[in-house]
């Protein structure tokens, strides 16, 4: 429990197109690189160090990416220090079916190691992932949770808003978004909540 919210609720956010998103550069001392063989271990270590809500095991990587390992060098980004220390990761994935040209792109498994949080890494990661999604997908989505206040702010800043169908179908989701708005007072969320 944090910020006055009593339960963590799974939520989805959507973006009607993948155009006109903010452009941010990594701060000095960091660089991007793509997935390479063996990065399943790097990804898992980052998740284990940073994930406060979901129990992370080595099997998580296989569950999330094991059927599509060939796509990882094109769709999974890492941020590392200039010295090569892993700092963060993000994937520009797809919602359900990578072979469907109308499929929504998915911002997937965003993580920043605690030692590198609050250093201006997340927004450049979103820029890079959105650039990749724009190359293959007309729209975008992501899944997250109502407890991830600062991540939700970044997603809202990038034009993602609560999935209206989910809010209508699930009263607990609408209530969770109202709780998020009490914490963030974000103009895009205010518009979504009407």
Image (spheres, rainbow, N blue to C red):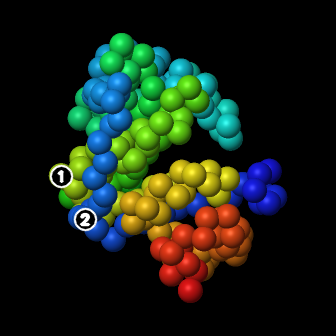
Tell which residue pokes out farthest to the left in this image: 135
For residue 186, above or below residue 157: below
Q: Residue at x 29, y 60 (%)?
A: 21
Tell which residue pokes out farthest to the bottom in this image: 194
At mark 2, the secondary structure is loop
Where is residue 194, by image quadrant?
Answer: bottom right
Q: Residue at x 53, y 35 (%)?
A: 117
Q: Position of residue 121 (x, y in %)?
A: 42, 38
Q: Residues within 10 Å of mark 1 (few under 14, many from 20)?
A: few
Q: Position of residue 162 (x, y in %)?
A: 52, 69
Q: CA distance from mark 1 to mark 2?
A: 13 Å
The answer to whether 130 appears left or right of 113 in the picture is left
For residue 71, above or below residue 97: above
Q: Residue at x 51, y 29 (%)?
A: 116
The answer to whether 193 appears left or right of 2 in the picture is left
Q: Position of residue 54 (x, y in %)?
A: 65, 38
Q: Identify the disc placed on residue 20.
A: 2
**Earlier sequence position, callout 1 versus callout 2:** 2
The answer to whether 58 appears left or right of 6 in the picture is left
Report the residue marked by disc 1.
Answer: 135
């Amino acid at each position: 429990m944090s910020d006055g919210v009593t339960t963590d609720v799974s939520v989805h956010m959507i973006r009607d197109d993948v155009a006109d998103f903010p452009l941010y550069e990594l701060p000095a001392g960091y660089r991007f690189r793509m997935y390479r063989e063996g990065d399943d271990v790097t990804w898992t270590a980052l998740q284990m160090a940073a994930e406060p809500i979901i129990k992370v095991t080595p099997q998580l990587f296989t569950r999330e990416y094991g059927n599509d390992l060939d796509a990882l060098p094109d769709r999974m980004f890492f941020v590392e220090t200039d010295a090569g220390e892993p700092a963060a990761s993000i994937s520009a994935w797809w919602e359900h079916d990578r072979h469907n040209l109308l499929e929504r792109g998915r911002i997937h498994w965003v993580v920043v190691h605690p030692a590198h949080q609050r250093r201006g890494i997340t927004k450049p990661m979103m820029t890079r992932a959105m650039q990749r999604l724009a190359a293959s997908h007309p729209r975008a989505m992501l899944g997250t949770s109502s407890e991830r206040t600062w991540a939700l702010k970044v997603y809202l800043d990038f034009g993602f808003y609560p999935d209206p169908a989910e809010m209508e179908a699930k009263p607990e989701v609408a209530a969770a978004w109202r709780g998020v708005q009490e914490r963030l007072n974000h103009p895009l969320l205010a518009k979504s909540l009407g």
